[in-house]
Image (cartoon, grey):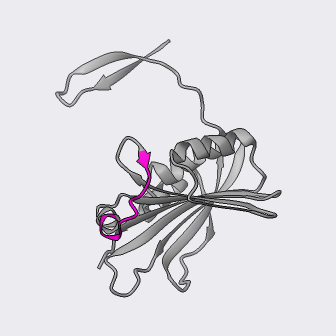
Amino acid sequence: MRWVAVVLTSGSLAILPHFAKAADPPLLAAFKQFCVDTKADRVAVEAAAIGAGGKPQSSENQVPGIAASASWEVALQGHTYKVSTGTQSPEANRDVQTVSCGVESPVDEDDASISAIRAWAGVPASHSFSDVMLIEIYDFQDNGQQHSALPSNDAAFHELEIAGKVWALGLMRSPTSTNVDLLHTVRARP
């Protein structure tokens, strides 16, 4: 067992035991570090990627429907990933927009990584397609501690959008690559 020193909000110093947790599979670890922990916020994703030694893969560009996007090549736990971020332009008469973060692996990731990502979603897939490539979409609301299904009522759904609680996870797996994307609906910036 290791011990860790923690400074409490009162200013006191506490020495607490630190229990090691099982490490996440590499793809899930990268997804959490670059997309979940940053809440898919473009500036935070960029800071996390650069902070991890990421090498820019594309410059800022203007793509129809995307206000800004960028990507970096990042090495984590012996794996190389492409981390991308973007902000979708708000649709006309909409007060919300979508920010996104994606992690692309140039290999077909192992089943443990895929299972761990599905478990992280915490809800059943909303949509699933399988041909040459497996595509699964998980739509959920984030309640702070857990994920739950989105309401079917349009007004309730819009309230969640305004509150920044609407999320989607996209999982795409082919014989040659695996992508995991996190999309977050937020109030549109003026």
Q: Of all residues shown, which one is farthest toward the left?
A: 10
Residue located 60% across and 45% down the image: 117
Above or below: residue 86 compared with residue 22: below
Question: Is residue 177 found left or right of 162 in the rendered image?
Answer: right
User: Picture coordinates of residue 155 (x, y %)?
Assistant: 30, 69
Question: Along the line of sight, which residue is nearer the eye, 7 or 40?
Answer: 40
Q: Of all residues shown, which one is farthest toward the front?
A: 153
Question: Is residue 140 found left or right of 5 in the rendered image?
Answer: right
Residue located 83% across and 57% down the image: 175
Question: Is residue 32 found left or right of 74 in the rendered image?
Answer: left
In the rendered picture of this protein, how many numbered marks are placed on residues?
0
Asked if the stretch drawn in magenta spans residue 173, the answer is: no
> Residue 113 is drawn in which quadrant?
top right
User: Picture coordinates of residue 160 (x, y %)?
Assistant: 32, 62
Question: Along the line of sight, which residue is nearer the eye, 3 or 19?
Answer: 19
Question: Is residue 138 found left or right of 95 in the rendered image?
Answer: right
Above or below: residue 164 compared with residue 147: below
Residue located 74% across and 47% down the image: 109
- Residue 51 in view: no
Q: Quadrant of the C terminus?
A: bottom left
- Residue 101 in view: yes
Question: Along the line of sight, which residue is nearer the eye, 183 or 34?
Answer: 183
User: Picture coordinates of residue 98 (x, y %)?
Assistant: 44, 70
Residue stretch rendered in magenta on the structure: 147-156
